[in-house]
Image: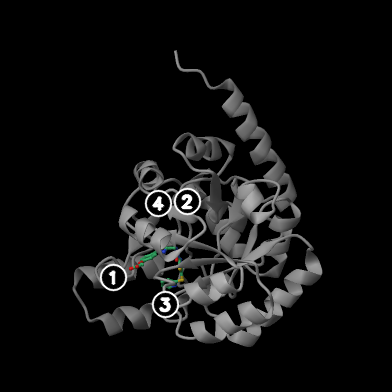
Amino acid sequence: MSITELLHIEYPILQGAMAQIAKAPLVAAVSNAGGLGIIASGGMSGEELRAEIKKTKTLTDKPFGVNLMLMMTNIEELTAVILEEGVKVVTTGAGTPKTYMPIWKEAGITVIPVVPSVMIARKMEQLGADAIVAEGTEAGGHVGETTTMALLPQVVDAVSIPVIAAGGIGDGRGIVAAFALGAQGVQMGTRFLATEECPVHENFKLACLNAKDRDTVVTGRRNGAPVRSIKNKMIKEYQRLEEENVDRDVLEELTLGSLRKAVQEGDTENGSVMAGQITGMITEIKPVSELMQEMVAQAKQVANELTIK
Ligand code: TUI
Protein backbone atom coordinates (compact mmCIF):
# COMPACT_ATOMS: atom_id res chain seq x y z
CA MET A 1 0.00 0.00 0.00
CA SER A 2 1.32 3.47 -0.84
CA ILE A 3 1.81 6.15 1.81
CA THR A 4 -1.03 8.22 0.35
CA GLU A 5 -3.39 5.21 0.58
CA LEU A 6 -2.19 4.31 4.08
CA LEU A 7 -2.76 7.84 5.37
CA HIS A 8 -5.69 8.84 3.10
CA ILE A 9 -3.87 11.94 1.86
CA GLU A 10 -3.26 13.45 -1.58
CA TYR A 11 0.52 13.96 -1.52
CA PRO A 12 3.13 11.79 0.30
CA ILE A 13 4.32 14.77 2.33
CA LEU A 14 4.23 14.81 6.13
CA GLN A 15 4.82 17.88 8.26
CA GLY A 16 7.42 17.17 10.93
CA ALA A 17 6.29 17.68 14.52
CA MET A 18 8.10 20.68 15.96
CA ALA A 19 7.69 21.06 19.72
CA GLN A 20 5.64 24.14 20.73
CA ILE A 21 5.27 25.09 17.04
CA ALA A 22 3.34 22.37 15.21
CA LYS A 23 -0.09 23.34 16.49
CA ALA A 24 -3.57 23.54 14.95
CA PRO A 25 -3.02 26.43 12.48
CA LEU A 26 0.00 24.80 10.79
CA VAL A 27 -1.29 21.24 11.10
CA ALA A 28 -4.67 22.10 9.53
CA ALA A 29 -3.01 24.15 6.76
CA VAL A 30 -0.78 21.21 5.76
CA SER A 31 -3.66 18.72 5.87
CA ASN A 32 -5.93 21.08 3.91
CA ALA A 33 -3.17 21.39 1.29
CA GLY A 34 -3.12 17.60 0.78
CA GLY A 35 -0.29 16.56 3.09
CA LEU A 36 -0.39 15.16 6.62
CA GLY A 37 -0.24 17.78 9.36
CA ILE A 38 1.10 16.47 12.67
CA ILE A 39 0.54 18.02 16.11
CA ALA A 40 3.67 18.07 18.29
CA SER A 41 2.55 17.06 21.77
CA GLY A 42 6.03 17.51 23.31
CA GLY A 43 5.73 19.93 26.21
CA MET A 44 1.92 19.78 26.35
CA SER A 45 -0.29 18.55 29.16
CA GLY A 46 -3.06 16.10 28.32
CA GLU A 47 -5.68 18.83 28.36
CA GLU A 48 -3.56 21.11 26.15
CA LEU A 49 -3.22 18.29 23.64
CA ARG A 50 -6.98 17.65 23.74
CA ALA A 51 -7.66 21.34 23.05
CA GLU A 52 -5.20 21.34 20.14
CA ILE A 53 -6.80 18.22 18.62
CA LYS A 54 -10.28 19.74 18.95
CA LYS A 55 -9.10 23.01 17.40
CA THR A 56 -7.49 21.14 14.50
CA LYS A 57 -10.77 19.28 13.89
CA THR A 58 -12.57 22.63 13.57
CA LEU A 59 -10.03 23.82 10.96
CA THR A 60 -9.87 20.72 8.75
CA ASP A 61 -11.87 17.62 7.95
CA LYS A 62 -8.78 15.99 6.44
CA PRO A 63 -6.61 13.41 8.26
CA PHE A 64 -3.93 14.64 10.66
CA GLY A 65 -1.61 12.99 13.18
CA VAL A 66 -0.12 13.49 16.63
CA ASN A 67 3.56 13.06 17.50
CA LEU A 68 4.65 11.72 20.86
CA MET A 69 8.11 12.64 22.07
CA LEU A 70 8.89 9.58 24.15
CA MET A 71 11.23 11.40 26.54
CA MET A 72 8.16 13.21 27.92
CA THR A 73 7.19 12.09 31.40
CA ASN A 74 3.40 12.41 30.86
CA ILE A 75 3.13 9.95 27.94
CA GLU A 76 0.41 7.92 29.71
CA GLU A 77 -1.78 10.99 29.92
CA LEU A 78 -1.11 11.97 26.28
CA THR A 79 -1.81 8.44 25.06
CA ALA A 80 -5.16 8.44 26.85
CA VAL A 81 -6.13 11.68 25.09
CA ILE A 82 -5.10 10.28 21.69
CA LEU A 83 -7.34 7.25 22.23
CA GLU A 84 -10.26 9.32 23.56
CA GLU A 85 -10.09 11.80 20.69
CA GLY A 86 -9.90 9.08 18.03
CA VAL A 87 -6.56 10.18 16.56
CA LYS A 88 -5.81 7.96 13.54
CA VAL A 89 -2.07 8.47 13.03
CA VAL A 90 0.68 8.59 15.67
CA THR A 91 4.34 9.31 14.99
CA THR A 92 6.90 8.81 17.75
CA GLY A 93 10.35 10.23 18.39
CA ALA A 94 13.29 10.09 20.76
CA GLY A 95 12.65 6.60 22.14
CA THR A 96 10.80 3.32 21.77
CA PRO A 97 6.99 3.10 21.70
CA LYS A 98 7.13 -0.58 22.74
CA THR A 99 4.85 -0.26 25.79
CA TYR A 100 2.09 1.54 23.89
CA MET A 101 2.22 -0.31 20.59
CA PRO A 102 -0.34 -3.02 21.50
CA ILE A 103 -2.88 -0.44 22.73
CA TRP A 104 -2.46 1.74 19.64
CA LYS A 105 -2.69 -1.20 17.22
CA GLU A 106 -5.77 -2.45 19.06
CA ALA A 107 -7.36 0.98 18.53
CA GLY A 108 -6.57 0.83 14.79
CA ILE A 109 -4.04 3.65 14.94
CA THR A 110 -1.44 3.88 12.18
CA VAL A 111 1.91 4.04 14.00
CA ILE A 112 4.95 5.63 12.36
CA PRO A 113 8.10 5.85 14.55
CA VAL A 114 10.86 8.27 13.60
CA VAL A 115 14.25 6.55 13.68
CA PRO A 116 17.89 7.60 13.22
CA SER A 117 19.45 4.19 12.43
CA VAL A 118 19.02 0.82 10.71
CA MET A 119 19.05 -1.05 14.01
CA ILE A 120 16.20 0.97 15.47
CA ALA A 121 14.27 0.78 12.17
CA ARG A 122 14.41 -3.03 12.34
CA LYS A 123 13.29 -2.96 15.98
CA MET A 124 10.28 -0.76 15.12
CA GLU A 125 9.23 -3.04 12.27
CA GLN A 126 9.31 -6.01 14.66
CA LEU A 127 7.14 -4.09 17.13
CA GLY A 128 4.50 -3.70 14.43
CA ALA A 129 5.08 -0.22 13.02
CA ASP A 130 3.05 0.49 9.87
CA ALA A 131 5.77 2.63 8.31
CA ILE A 132 8.86 4.46 9.56
CA VAL A 133 10.40 7.85 9.12
CA ALA A 134 14.17 7.55 8.62
CA GLU A 135 15.58 10.85 9.83
CA GLY A 136 19.07 11.96 8.85
CA THR A 137 21.30 14.22 10.90
CA GLU A 138 20.52 17.18 8.61
CA ALA A 139 17.22 17.56 10.47
CA GLY A 140 16.53 20.10 13.17
CA GLY A 141 16.05 19.26 16.84
CA HIS A 142 17.05 15.92 18.37
CA VAL A 143 19.13 14.06 15.75
CA GLY A 144 21.20 10.96 15.10
CA GLU A 145 24.62 10.69 13.43
CA THR A 146 23.96 9.46 9.90
CA THR A 147 23.08 11.62 6.91
CA THR A 148 19.81 11.09 5.05
CA MET A 149 21.78 10.24 1.88
CA ALA A 150 23.53 7.33 3.62
CA LEU A 151 20.79 6.29 6.06
CA LEU A 152 17.83 6.09 3.72
CA PRO A 153 18.90 3.33 1.29
CA GLN A 154 20.24 1.26 4.19
CA VAL A 155 16.93 1.49 6.05
CA VAL A 156 14.98 0.79 2.84
CA ASP A 157 17.05 -2.40 2.34
CA ALA A 158 16.63 -3.47 5.98
CA VAL A 159 12.84 -3.31 6.38
CA SER A 160 9.80 -4.25 4.32
CA ILE A 161 7.42 -1.55 5.61
CA PRO A 162 7.25 1.79 3.74
CA VAL A 163 10.01 4.28 4.56
CA ILE A 164 9.48 8.03 4.73
CA ALA A 165 12.57 10.26 4.45
CA ALA A 166 13.32 13.16 6.78
CA GLY A 167 16.25 15.49 7.32
CA GLY A 168 17.66 17.77 4.65
CA ILE A 169 14.58 17.92 2.43
CA GLY A 170 13.48 21.45 1.59
CA ASP A 171 11.95 21.46 -1.90
CA GLY A 172 10.86 19.36 -4.88
CA ARG A 173 14.43 18.38 -5.69
CA GLY A 174 14.85 16.92 -2.22
CA ILE A 175 11.60 14.98 -2.60
CA VAL A 176 12.82 13.39 -5.86
CA ALA A 177 16.19 12.58 -4.27
CA ALA A 178 14.44 10.84 -1.37
CA PHE A 179 12.29 8.81 -3.76
CA ALA A 180 15.37 7.90 -5.80
CA LEU A 181 16.86 6.44 -2.60
CA GLY A 182 13.78 4.29 -2.04
CA ALA A 183 11.57 6.45 0.15
CA GLN A 184 7.83 6.40 -0.47
CA GLY A 185 7.22 9.71 1.25
CA VAL A 186 8.93 12.64 2.90
CA GLN A 187 8.62 14.46 6.19
CA MET A 188 9.61 18.13 6.31
CA GLY A 189 9.77 20.34 9.37
CA THR A 190 11.99 23.37 8.83
CA ARG A 191 10.46 24.30 5.46
CA PHE A 192 6.97 24.35 6.97
CA LEU A 193 8.24 26.48 9.85
CA ALA A 194 8.84 29.37 7.45
CA THR A 195 5.22 29.61 6.28
CA GLU A 196 2.53 32.21 6.89
CA GLU A 197 0.33 29.86 8.89
CA CYS A 198 3.10 28.64 11.22
CA PRO A 199 2.40 29.87 14.77
CA VAL A 200 5.97 30.67 15.79
CA HIS A 201 7.37 34.10 16.67
CA GLU A 202 8.23 36.16 13.57
CA ASN A 203 11.87 36.46 14.76
CA PHE A 204 12.19 32.65 14.60
CA LYS A 205 11.08 32.69 10.95
CA LEU A 206 13.51 35.54 10.24
CA ALA A 207 16.35 33.57 11.85
CA CYS A 208 15.57 30.71 9.44
CA LEU A 209 15.48 33.10 6.48
CA ASN A 210 18.81 34.65 7.44
CA ALA A 211 20.68 31.43 8.24
CA LYS A 212 23.15 30.11 5.67
CA ASP A 213 24.22 26.52 4.95
CA ARG A 214 26.74 26.35 7.84
CA ASP A 215 24.74 28.23 10.43
CA THR A 216 23.23 25.24 12.23
CA VAL A 217 25.20 23.14 14.68
CA VAL A 218 24.66 20.05 16.83
CA THR A 219 25.24 20.48 20.55
CA GLY A 220 24.74 18.07 23.44
CA ARG A 221 26.28 14.98 21.83
CA ARG A 222 28.33 14.51 24.99
CA ASN A 223 25.34 14.24 27.32
CA GLY A 224 23.36 11.97 25.03
CA ALA A 225 20.74 14.39 23.70
CA PRO A 226 22.19 15.90 20.52
CA VAL A 227 20.14 18.79 19.17
CA ARG A 228 20.61 20.77 15.94
CA SER A 229 19.81 24.45 16.10
CA ILE A 230 20.85 27.76 14.59
CA LYS A 231 24.09 29.12 16.11
CA ASN A 232 23.52 32.08 18.42
CA LYS A 233 24.77 33.57 21.66
CA MET A 234 23.29 30.80 23.81
CA ILE A 235 24.72 28.02 21.59
CA LYS A 236 28.20 29.57 21.63
CA GLU A 237 28.06 29.70 25.43
CA TYR A 238 26.84 26.06 25.47
CA GLN A 239 29.77 25.00 23.25
CA ARG A 240 32.22 26.84 25.49
CA LEU A 241 30.83 25.11 28.59
CA GLU A 242 30.79 21.72 26.81
CA GLU A 243 34.50 22.14 26.02
CA GLU A 244 35.17 22.94 29.67
CA ASN A 245 33.47 19.64 30.56
CA VAL A 246 31.15 21.31 33.06
CA ASP A 247 28.50 19.37 34.96
CA ARG A 248 25.28 18.41 33.20
CA ASP A 249 23.30 20.66 35.57
CA VAL A 250 25.13 23.75 34.32
CA LEU A 251 24.24 22.92 30.71
CA GLU A 252 20.67 22.11 31.66
CA GLU A 253 20.33 25.42 33.45
CA LEU A 254 21.44 27.25 30.31
CA THR A 255 18.89 25.47 28.10
CA LEU A 256 16.02 25.48 30.59
CA GLY A 257 13.01 27.09 28.91
CA SER A 258 15.19 28.04 25.93
CA LEU A 259 12.81 26.68 23.30
CA ARG A 260 9.95 28.74 24.75
CA LYS A 261 12.21 31.81 24.75
CA ALA A 262 12.79 31.51 21.01
CA VAL A 263 9.37 30.18 19.91
CA GLN A 264 7.14 32.41 22.02
CA GLU A 265 9.20 35.44 23.01
CA GLY A 266 11.20 35.65 19.78
CA ASP A 267 14.51 35.81 21.65
CA THR A 268 16.63 34.18 18.96
CA GLU A 269 19.93 35.03 20.68
CA ASN A 270 19.31 33.47 24.09
CA GLY A 271 16.69 30.93 23.02
CA SER A 272 16.92 27.58 21.26
CA VAL A 273 16.25 28.03 17.53
CA MET A 274 15.95 24.40 16.45
CA ALA A 275 16.15 24.11 12.65
CA GLY A 276 17.56 21.75 10.02
CA GLN A 277 20.37 22.34 7.55
CA ILE A 278 17.96 23.23 4.73
CA THR A 279 17.25 26.48 6.56
CA GLY A 280 20.02 27.90 4.32
CA MET A 281 17.83 27.48 1.24
CA ILE A 282 14.73 29.21 2.58
CA THR A 283 14.42 32.65 1.01
CA GLU A 284 10.71 33.34 1.39
CA ILE A 285 7.86 32.90 3.84
CA LYS A 286 4.81 31.77 1.93
CA PRO A 287 1.39 30.24 2.50
CA VAL A 288 1.41 26.46 3.05
CA SER A 289 -0.84 25.72 0.05
CA GLU A 290 1.41 27.69 -2.31
CA LEU A 291 4.53 25.97 -0.92
CA MET A 292 2.91 22.57 -1.33
CA GLN A 293 1.80 23.19 -4.93
CA GLU A 294 5.24 24.53 -5.88
CA MET A 295 7.08 21.60 -4.31
CA VAL A 296 4.87 18.99 -5.95
CA ALA A 297 5.14 20.72 -9.37
CA GLN A 298 8.92 21.00 -9.01
CA ALA A 299 9.24 17.35 -7.96
CA LYS A 300 7.25 16.20 -11.02
CA GLN A 301 9.31 18.38 -13.35
CA VAL A 302 12.65 17.29 -11.90
CA ALA A 303 11.62 13.63 -12.05
CA ASN A 304 10.54 13.99 -15.69
CA GLU A 305 13.76 15.67 -16.73
CA LEU A 306 16.11 13.18 -15.08
CA THR A 307 18.52 11.59 -17.53
CA ILE A 308 21.75 9.77 -16.86
CA LYS A 309 24.02 9.89 -19.88
O1 TUI B 1 12.47 13.48 18.14
C1 TUI B 1 13.00 14.00 17.20
N1 TUI B 1 13.33 15.30 17.17
C2 TUI B 1 13.12 16.18 18.19
S1 TUI B 1 12.36 15.86 19.66
C3 TUI B 1 12.61 17.41 20.16
S2 TUI B 1 12.10 18.01 21.70
C4 TUI B 1 13.56 18.14 22.55
N2 TUI B 1 13.73 19.23 23.24
C5 TUI B 1 14.84 19.41 23.96
C6 TUI B 1 15.83 18.47 23.97
C7 TUI B 1 15.70 17.34 23.24
C8 TUI B 1 14.54 17.16 22.50
C9 TUI B 1 13.23 18.11 19.19
N3 TUI B 1 13.50 17.41 18.11
N4 TUI B 1 13.29 13.31 16.07
C10 TUI B 1 13.02 11.92 15.98
C11 TUI B 1 14.14 11.12 16.45
N5 TUI B 1 13.98 10.05 17.16
N6 TUI B 1 15.44 11.35 16.25
C12 TUI B 1 16.12 10.34 16.86
C13 TUI B 1 15.17 9.52 17.43
C14 TUI B 1 15.33 8.30 18.17
C15 TUI B 1 16.42 8.10 19.01
C16 TUI B 1 16.53 6.93 19.72
C17 TUI B 1 14.36 7.30 18.06
C18 TUI B 1 14.49 6.12 18.77
C19 TUI B 1 15.56 5.96 19.59
O2 TUI B 1 15.76 4.83 20.33
C20 TUI B 1 14.80 3.81 20.34
C21 TUI B 1 15.31 2.58 21.01
O3 TUI B 1 14.70 1.54 20.83
O4 TUI B 1 16.34 2.69 21.69
Sequence-wise first label, 3 or 2: 3
Q: Are marks 1 and 3 in contact (CB under 8 Å)?
A: no
Q: Which residue is pictured at 66% across the width and 71% down the height?
A: 87
SS of the residue at dot 3? loop
Q: Is mark 2 within 8 Å of ligand 1?
A: no
Q: CA distance from mark 1 to mark 4?
A: 17 Å
What is the CA distance from the residue labelled 1 to the residue labelled 3? 12 Å
Name which residue type carries label 2. Answer: Ile
- Tag of residue 136: 4
Residue 233: percent from left, percent from top? 40, 67
Residue 125 seen in the current view = yes
Q: Residues within 10 Å of mark 3 (few under 14, many from 20)?
A: few
Residue 71 numbered tag: 3
- Asked whether 226 or 111 is in front, the reply is 111
Marks 3,2: beta carbons within 8 A: no
Mark 2 or mark 1, earlier in chain: 2
Which of pointers 1 and 3 indicates the residue nearer the eye? 3
Residue 116 coordinates in the image, percent (x, y): 37, 57
For the residues labelled 1 and 4, say whether their Cβ atoms are less than 8 Å apart. no
How far apart in space, not on screen, are marks 4 and 2 (Cα)? Answer: 18 Å
Residue beneath label 2, please?
161
Quadrant of the image where one finds ligand 1:
bottom left
CA–CA distance in space, label 3 to label 2: 25 Å
Amino acid found under the numbered disc labelled 4: Gly
Amino acid under disc 1: Gly
Position of the C terminus by quadrant? top left
Report the disc number at residue 185.
Answer: none
Q: Which residue is mark 1?
A: 224
Q: Nearer the viewer, residue 261 or 184?
A: 184
